[in-house]
Amino acid sequence: MPDRPFTYESRAQRVLFGAGTLAQAPDELDRLGARKALVLSTAPQRGQAEQVAALLGPRAAGIFDGAVMHVPLASAEAARAAARDAGADALVAVGGGSTVGLAKAIALVAPLPVLAIPITYAGSEMTPIYGLTENGLKRTGRDARVLPRTVLYDPDLTLALPVGLSVVSGINAIAHAAEGLYAADGNPVTSLMAAEGIAALGRALPALHADPRDRAARSDALYGAWLCGLVLGSVAMALHHKLCHTLGGSFNLPHAELHTVVLPHVLAYNAVAAPQAMQRIASALGTVDAAQGVQALARRLGAPVALRDIGMRAQDLDQACALALRDAYPNPRPIEAAPLRALLQAAYDGAPPA
Ligand code: NAD
């Protein structure tokens, strides 16, 4: 029984899930009424973009492989020009959060439907959130126009995702669901999705760490990522996402690794204020304590657990703390300078979450 009143709102998206689903991309573009789609990717993923373009045949208007992390304004403008010059009437994003983010940056200014084909577990394809980085500052916003209209989740496309990146990307997804479980605007449906998403990733990550080509584990992980992304797009995130946004943007730290290091410490910080959420996270992971369970998972799978190991400098911790305190945002436990600074120190050192 729900313990408080809630509002539940769903968004119009069509999601196809399963091995081999990629083959349906041409039909899905037809459903969108598109005839000339620009295929987007990062430079390293150009090969995958070429495969998709070949599958689309005459429906492909070209490939733009300039997606980079955090969508710098210059790359967004180059991609917008490429879409215009190609006469594109749709966008196909083949990649992770950076590539989906680039498609969103185009869709923000041109009314083009986005078909997303995710190959990491970041979850951007399920959210109306966009980000653009200008002069080192990342600005994010919500706009219904950027939400991908169709998402094809084909686990076969994730078989080549390097195992290290798979693990941190999976824990990045767990972070969306974990914060969703204590979101101020949460509801029973997003909580169900969050618990199921965490459980799926908690099972899948050790299995794909043992065998990255385990197709059942890849499917389970992508299923979890979908659910966690849906939670991210539906309810308000709190301290963890704010902190990662600040640290990532200001100190140029790698996105998924950063989420992996910080999450256990934020869960420990919020534990007293959100005991039910912690219990659901712990039980989804099959552990006793949510914060320790997440860090143990990361350690066991060889992921980083210390900010100092992913490029953070000790002398920047005070500034990071000040930046994180600057704007108000919802969080179950009030955000105060001294405990926040202690959290950052523990994350820097890779200490056990407390
Ligand atoms: P990413 O898209 O930058 O991908 C990480 C790296 O992995 C890239 O170099 C990419 O080329 C490589 N890669 C991807 N798939 C691969 C594969 N199959 N094989 C080999 N290499 C592969 O990273 P990400 O973690 O997916 O996304 C992070 C970005 O997305 C951040 O900028 C973050 O802010 C944003 N994001 C946005 C939202 C949102 O809702 N707007 C949600 C999550 C993440």
Image: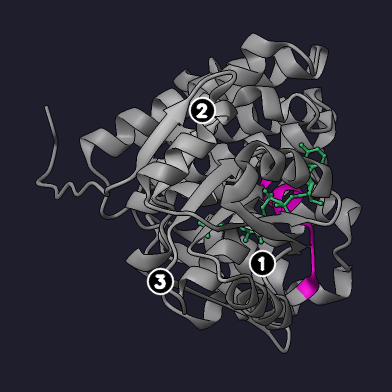
Closer to the camera in the image, 147 or 93: 93
Per the rendering, the mark at residue 224 is 2
- How would you rate the neighbour count of disc 3 (Cα within 10 Å): few for under 14, some for 14-19, many for 20 or more? few
Q: Residue at x 40, y 71 (%)?
A: 111
Q: CA distance from mark 3 to mark 2?
A: 30 Å
Q: Mark 3 sits on what residue?
A: 111
Residue 250 seen in this snapshot: yes
Closer to the camera in the image, 125 or 287: 125
Main secondary structure along the magenta-highlighted residues? helix
- Residues in magenta? 251-259
- Residue 83: x and y in percent read 60, 71
Q: Residue at x 72, y 89 (%)?
A: 135
Check whether the beta carbons of the residues at disc 3 and disc 2 lie within 8 A of each other: no
Left or right, 187 with respect to 198, comes to left
In this rendering, the answer to whether 281 lies above or below 335 is: above
Left or right, 172 with respect to 194, comes to right
Q: CA distance from mark 3 to mark 1?
A: 44 Å
- How would you rate the neighbour count of disc 1 (Cα within 10 Å): few for under 14, some for 14-19, many for 20 or more? some
Quadrant location of the C terminus?
top right
Which is more foreground, mark 3 or mark 2? Answer: 3
Given the image, on which type of amino acid does mark 1 rest?
Arg
- Residue 304: x and y in percent read 83, 41
Per the rendering, the mark at residue 317 is none
Q: Mark 1 sits on what residue?
A: 341
